[in-house]
Image (tube, rainbow, N blue to C red):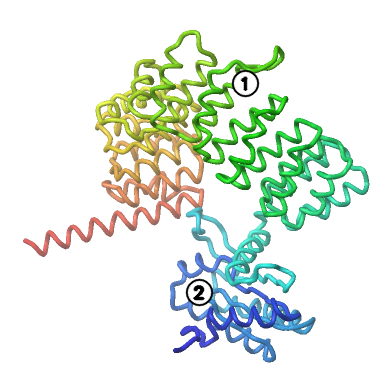
């Protein structure tokens, strides 16, 4: 069996994994993951033949630059090299410089003069992409889990750094310095929680020191939250330890951290904390049961949703809210009747919170409650188990909700995005009409919805948007690009209708998107005309 990559002739995945095990994990060597930044847009722009040439050339450069070391080709533009010492690192750097020196030859003269290409990236946004370069990620045997996949993840992060999409250095070394130098409290808290947001496993040592040491409770609380986000086995041990902390806020964060990091398995560990004297801890348990998906806790949540909280200083409303939040996360459809009964009880509180929970749980009972209120759609409405008759009534209510302001329109679009039936004609017309008033993300989401639902574009829609552009309204470049993508897919209009306001736009991204739409429309028209001619 041939274990080499057919494009470059270099060893493939199975050999690469053996080399990682032999040289890196069990040895003293390093691995370098090498791939090309923004290769896919280049490949789309210039074509697969030239793209394959770039990949083959990079393979040759790596082979020539690392004659004494291993070079493997995972596939696509991804390579892995292994070797020892500073010589290996220097050879990789030489390969990078050689690749940079030859990349201009892959471009047209115009693009060389520009220093790159203007095209669409992976997210479909039109932007300028500089000449090809390679990203290199080095790793050594100090990492516990060594695999092609783990190296690939690190490479993706490194490419983001190179494009300015992520901070360049880890946070925890700065946090260590902050602890040593008695940095201001709020700023230190921000550093602690930043390590959690970025899932920095290297931060666990300093977080351990904060959580188990004689630090201010504010810092211990933030450390518990960060450990919950990082969520490895050692973090869980520390969070279990912190359930006995003297401060209720630290215990609260520890409960939250366990439900985040352990999911379902946290249920039995956090449920005993319902006997805690602190309302904050008890509320964290109630909402945590829902976030963890621990359905065995549903009976407890129902009981606490109707109970009077113990003690004269305890806020019953807040504890009931936490229980209802937990129920809404579990979304038990069989409990819609129980929730409706609470909502219909005029003496129950918090009444609006139980309404929101009923809407999150769904079924016809929830739908009929929303319809009976006859105002506008709630922010979340579960449509599972709702009959067509009620779906149509909700559709009509949603159409009326579109004009109630941006915050309500955002939730209404979410409803339409999850609507399981084809739209009524009146709904389609009203959605198109809103292209005359929406801007930015609302406009973009609306046209994506229309495209997804396979609704065609007509002349009046083109004219409506063109009129806004011509009058100087700022709809947004990405929103207009999404609109033109819809036109490209569903446009039943003459391609000439895009000439004045779109093709001639001084915004390059809009003009480029319009060019693609014109091409798609003309191609459909000419194909249809050819077929008609052939038949006759």
Q: Furthest-right residue in view?
A: 181
Quadrant hosting residue 534? bottom left
In percent of the image, x 41 and y 38: which residue is there? Answer: 446
Tell me where residue 198 appears, x and y as whole percent.
69, 51
Quadrant hosting residue 213? top right
The answer to whether 333 appears left or right of 127 in the picture is left
Mark 1 element type: helix
Of the pair 402 and 434, the residue shown nearer to us? 402
Of the pair 424 and 24, the residue shown nearer to us? 24
Local crowd at mark 1 within 10 Å, few (<14), some, or many (≥20)? some
Tell me where residue 307 appears, x and y as whole percent.
57, 18
Q: Which residue is mark 1?
A: 318
Task: Tell me, for residue 76, which label it has, or none.
Answer: 2
Query: Where's the C terminus, which quadrant?
Result: bottom left
Q: Furthest-bottom residue in view?
A: 67
How many badges with numbers are in the image?
Answer: 2
Tell me where residue 487 appears, x and y as whole percent.
34, 47
Mark 2 element type: loop
Task: Tell me, for residue 469, which label it has, or none.
Answer: none
Tell me where residue 176 appears, x and y as whole percent.
86, 52
Query: Where's the N terminus, which quadrant?
Result: bottom left
Of the numbered discs 1 and 2, the one sitting upstream in the chain is: 2
The answer to whether 445 appears left or right of 300 in the picture is left
Quadrant hosting residue 374? top left
Residue 113 in view here: no
In percent of the image, x 45 and y 48: which residue is there? Answer: 481
Q: Nearer the viewer, mark 1 or mark 2?
A: 1
Of the pair 512 and 29, the residue shown nearer to us? 29
């Amino acid at each position: 069996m041939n274990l080499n990559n057919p494009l470059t002739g270099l060893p493939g995945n199975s050999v690469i994994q053996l080399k990682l095990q032999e040289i890196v994990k069990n040895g003293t060597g390093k691995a370098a993951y090498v791939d090309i930044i923004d290769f896919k847009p280049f490949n789309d722009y210039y074509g697969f033949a030239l793209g394959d040439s770039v990949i083959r050339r990079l393979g040759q450069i790596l082979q020539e630059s690392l004659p004494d070391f291993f070079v493997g080709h995972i596939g696509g533009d991804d390579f892995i090299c292994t070797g020892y010492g500073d010589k290996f690192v220097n050879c990789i750097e030489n390969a990078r410089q050689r690749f940079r020196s030859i990349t201009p030859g892959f471009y047209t003269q115009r693009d060389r003069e520009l220093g790159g290409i203007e095209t669409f990236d992976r997210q479909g946004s039109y932007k300028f992409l500089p000449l090809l370069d390679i990203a290199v990620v080095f790793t050594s045997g100090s990492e516990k889990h060594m695999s092609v996949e783990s190296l690939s993840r690190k490479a993706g992060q490194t490419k983001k750094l190179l494009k300015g999409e992520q901070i360049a250095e880890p946070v925890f070394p700065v946090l260590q310095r902050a602890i040593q130098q008695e940095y201001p409290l709020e700023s230190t808290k921000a550093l602690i929680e930043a390590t959690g947001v970025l899932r920095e496993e290297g931060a666990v040592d300093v977080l351990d020191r904060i959580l188990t040491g004689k630090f201010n409770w504010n810092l211990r609380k933030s450390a518990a939250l960060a450990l919950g986000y990082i969520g490895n086995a050692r973090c869980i041990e520390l969070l279990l330890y912190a359930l006995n902390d003297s401060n209720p806020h630290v215990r609260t964060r520890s409960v939250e951290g366990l439900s985040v990091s352990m999911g379902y398995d946290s249920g039995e560990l956090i449920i005993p904390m319902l006997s805690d004297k602190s309302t904050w801890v008890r509320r964290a348990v109630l909402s945590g049961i829902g976030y963890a998906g621990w359905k065995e806790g549903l009976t407890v949540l129902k009981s606490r949703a109707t109970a009077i909280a113990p003690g004269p200083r305890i806020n019953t409303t807040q504890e009931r809210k936490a229980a209802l939040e937990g129920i809404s996360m579990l979304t038990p459809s069989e409990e819609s009747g129980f929730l409706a009964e609470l909502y219909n009880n005029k003496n129950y509180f918090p009444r609006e919170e139980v309404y929101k929970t009923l809407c999150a749980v769904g079924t016809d009972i929830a739908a009929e409650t929303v319809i009976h209120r006859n105002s506008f759609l709630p922010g979340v409405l579960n449509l599972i188990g709702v009959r067509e008759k009620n779906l149509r009534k909700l559709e009509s209510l949603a159409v009326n909700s579109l004009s109630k302001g941006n915050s309500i329109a955002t939730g209404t679009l979410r409803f339409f995005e999850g609507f399981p039936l084809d739209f009524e004609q009146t709904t389609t017309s009203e959605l198109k009409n809103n292209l005359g008033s929406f801007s930015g993300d609302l406009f973009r989401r609306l046209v994506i919805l229309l495209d997804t639902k396979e609704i065609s574009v007509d002349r009046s829609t083109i004219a409506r948007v063109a009129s806004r552009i011509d009058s100087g309204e700022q709809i947004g470049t990405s929103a207009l690009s999404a609109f033109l993508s819809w036109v490209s897919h569903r446009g039943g209009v003459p391609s000439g209708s895009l000439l004045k306001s779109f093709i001639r736009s001084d915004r390059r991204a809009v003009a480029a998107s319009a060019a693609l739409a014109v091409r798609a429309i003309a191609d459909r028209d000419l194909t249809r005309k050819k077929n008609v001619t052939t038949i006759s």
